[in-house]
Every structure is written in C-alpha cells, then in structure tokens.
Amino acid sequence: MENIENKNEIMLEDAARIIKLDGTNASFVMKDGFLALTLKTNGEEKVYDRVFLHRAFPHELLWEYISVTGDENKEIGLIYNIDDFGEEDVELLKTEINRKYYSPVISEIQSVKERYGFSYWKVRIDDGRILSFTMQDTFGKIIRIGEDSAILVDVDGNRYTIKSILGLDKKSYRKIELYL
C-alpha cells in the first residue's frame, strides 16, 4: 500500500511540474517532415525528434498557452506566448499550428440536403472555392462559439468555421438557422 502511495505522489509531482518553453531554453526545427524540439534545462540538452502542439484555448488565445507533447502524448512543456521565440521558431510554430487547426471559413451556404440522418452541405469558403461535406447528427455537430460564431464538424472530423452567423447573407442564414 505504501508503495502505491509513493508512486501516486511521484506522478502528481511530475504533473505539477510545468516547464515554460521560450527562446532561452527551446528551439524548433523541421526534421524529416515533422516538428522537432531541442530543449535545454539544468545544463542538459535533450532532443525530441517529433513533437505535437495543442492549444489550451483554441478559440480565444490562438498564440498563447500552447502545450508541447512528445511520444505517448506526454507533455514536455508549455509555450506561454510564441512571441517569446525568435522569428524562425515563430514561423515554424505558426505554420504547424495553422496546419493542425486548419478550418476553412464559410462565407456562403449554397445548399443543405438531408437524407437518412445525414446532411450534405455545399458551401463557399472565404477564398472563393466551393466545398462539399457531409455531417451526421447535424444538431450535435454544429458547435456554437460565443454569440455569433460556429464550428461545423463533418463525418471525417474536419472543421469549418462560420465567423459571423448573423453576417451571412439571408439565404445562407435560412439554411443554417434550423440547426442552431
């Protein structure tokens, strides 16, 4: 019993220890197509061949409080603000985060058709392209963000953003209002 308590204390101690990552102790590079990290702590240097970035507040603080994890999703440290890094690191971090959190912005909803529990969407995104996607459980897969924004999640887990629901044209608004 005592051994289990000691193990739990050690695990809790590890969880409570957060390493703040900034330009003084960490640097990022692309290695074999993956983001890699070199971390210098307590006079030692450790290289992580592949790391992953996760926003703690994905809708409010886009460039602050970013968790850096390694193998087995174990947290390595936390970036309080990416501006604490040099230009090259900031560019790599922004590229990787934008890739991970890519979410086309819907500017117009051209059509929504329902069949057998699925809804089939045809939308125009902010760069002018027309995209089509399918949603299941449409009511549950439209996630309101604040008063006027929403995220739509398709059957493949892809995310699409509507920055202003009220800013949509009347035809588009009528097509989505049923689901809000």
Image (spheres, helix red, strand yellow):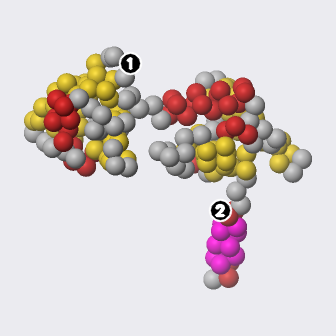
Image vertical order of residue 127 relative to residue 8, above or below: above
Left/right of residue 50 with respect to residue 171 in the rendered view: right
Question: Residue at 37% across / 29% down in the picture?
Answer: 105
**What's the residue type where badge 1 is placed?**
Asp
- Is 132 included in the stretch rendered in magenta? no
Q: Residue furthest bottom?
A: 1
Q: What stretch is highlighted in magenta?
A: 4-13
Residue 128, image x and y in percent?
34, 16
> Can residue 69 be seen here?
no
Q: Residues within 10 Å of mark 1 (few under 14, many from 20)?
A: few
- Between the C-alphas of marks 2 and 1, the distance is 43 Å
**What's the residue type where badge 2 is placed?**
Ala
> Can residue 44 be seen here?
yes
Left/right of residue 114 with respect to residue 85 in the rendered view: left
**Secondary structure under badge 1?**
loop
* Residue picked out by circle 2: 15
Residue 127, numbered circle? 1
Image vertical order of residue 11 relative to residue 145, above or below: below
Quarter occupied by the N terminus: bottom right
Residue 39, image x and y in percent?
77, 42
Q: Residue furthest top?
A: 128
Question: Residue at 32% across / 29% down in the picture?
Answer: 106
Q: Which of marks 2 and 1 is in front?
A: 1
**Secondary structure under badge 2?**
helix
Residue 40, image x and y in percent?
82, 43
Q: Residues within 10 Å of mark 2 (few under 14, many from 20)?
A: few
